[in-house]
Image (cartoon, rainbow, N blue to C red):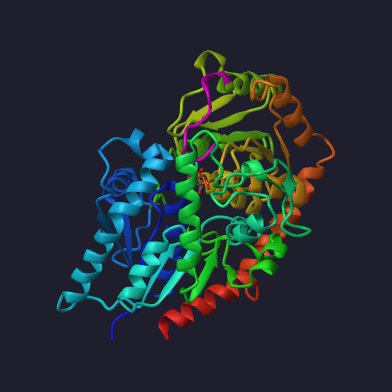
Amino acid sequence: MGRPHVMVIPYPAQGHVLPLMSFSRYLAYQGIQITFINTEFNHNLIINSLSKSSHDDYMGDRIKLVSIPDGLEDSPEERNIPGKLSESVLSFMPTKVEELIERMISERDGPIISCIVADQSLGWAIEVAAKFGIRRAAFCPAAAATMVLGFSIQKLVDDGLIDPDGTPRVNKSIQLCPAMPKMETDKFVWVCLKNRESQRNIFQLMLQNNKSIESTDWLLCNSVYELETAAFGLSPKILPIGPIGWAHSESTSLGSFLPQDRDCLDWLDRQIPGSVVYVAFGSFGFMSKAQLEELAIGLELTKRPVLWVTGSGDQPPLKLVSDRVKLVRWAPQREVLSHRAIGCFVSHCGWNSTLEGAENGIPFLCIPYFADQFINKEYICDVWKIGLGLERDERGMVPRLEVKKKIDEIMGDDGEYKKRAMMVKEIVVKSIAKDGISHDNLRKFVKWIKS
Ligand code: UDP
């Protein structure tokens, strides 16, 4: 018998592909063969972004990258419209994955698939696995609290907080149980009042996914038990294994959609420890030009060195960027956050960024925009108390003076936030060290795959 073989299927967005790639690398190190499924569009981005430098470790033939079409035109803009992508994922990808599995099974020396690990948001992939009688695991790249919110939908309807189509009936702040992050009903992950149809689709999909997940053998979550004790208490089926890929694998750009600019690490080497403000808002460009300008001026007012990732969004106005500011399109974020020069992280609070800041003991300034980012912000500011929210004014804009004031507060002399952030780091490190909960769950999962 050959090596055990796992097929990994992420939702085709950067914040999903990266953690599933980290998970795949971990499994590959344990001697497991991986077939990693990307859409053709993302596959090409990933291959074109792989750096030629020697630091990249592709894991040889242990991780095989395979692609399928996503049914969309060849334009990045189309994929940035959230409704568009999820619609095509649902109508196009399932058949393609089925065809792929059929081909693999029919090949004479083709590998036996020991397990399919599918993104929790791809319930159909779990069902495809079930149809072929393949063992299956769901992987949640978001916080356990976000999953628990999805599992609580019926109760929210029963309690009169939302309509059966997900629309909030009242605007209020709730907690699913004490010690859970507060959630605003009008900011529930599916709520999109400007586009009711899209909201209904997302909401329906969440309900379907909840059902599909019931048949999985494992429900793994890229999180840490001690950081979300209340959420894991509410849904004991969710098993924390995070932060995935931190201690297990050396740096690599495998999975990045944009090439990493590694020069910024040299620039960081030249900065004073703890002095740099790191600014990055993940893979969606959603900040308005006016907001970028306020942010740039606010940062300039702090007179601190800034490393700013522009990503696929607009650039901050260059006239406002002084020589204290290093702009990059895409950074090796995990390495950046572990660099001693970093003092704080101005973030949109995507879950990966949230965990990556937490695992490195970095205090946050939060500007959440949509989806689960509000929940993650509550964890940072209210539950773990390692950051501050940047408050918006009546125009919905974070003004320059707010930026300066909060950065000065976070990086101020008493070091309160840094101290707590270092305590959070310690908790995270313990969880992935020997005898830690994430570590144990990973071991059990690997043992099961090999059994
Ligand atoms: N990221 C990166 N380089 C950058 C900015 C982001 O490698 O310059 C990575 C980051 O480390 C994280 C992911 O992109 O793993 C973004 O995921 P997140 O959940 O934070 O945000 P999303 O893009 O899903 O909104």
Answer with the quarter of the image where residue 125 lies.
bottom left
**Magenta residue check for 283:** yes
Residue lying furthest top: 319
Q: Identify whether 153 is placed above or below 337.
A: below
Query: What residue is drawn where x is 42% and y is 53%?
Result: 17
Which residue, as the protein is rendered here, is positioned at the far right?
Answer: 414
Q: Position of residue 41 (x, y in %)?
A: 28, 45
Task: Tell me which residue sits at (60%, 29%) in the image.
Answer: 306
User: Observer-nearest residue: 426 or 375?
Assistant: 375
Q: Could you tell whether 440 is left or right of 416 in the image? A: left
Locate the C terminus by quadrant.
bottom left
Quadrant of the snapshot with the N terminus: bottom left
Is 86 on the left-hand or right-hand side of 240? Answer: left
Instruction: Write down the region rendered in magenta.
Output: 281-290
Vertical position of residue 154 compared to residue 380: above or below: below
Q: Judge whether residue 197 is colored magenta.
A: no
Q: Nearer the viewer, residue 431 or 341?
A: 431
- Tell me if I can see residue 251 in this picture: no
Magenta span: predominant SS is loop
At 56% across and 52% down in the image, what residue appears? 164
**Residue 413 locus on image (x, y percent):** 83, 35
Residue 116, percent from left and from top = 37, 70
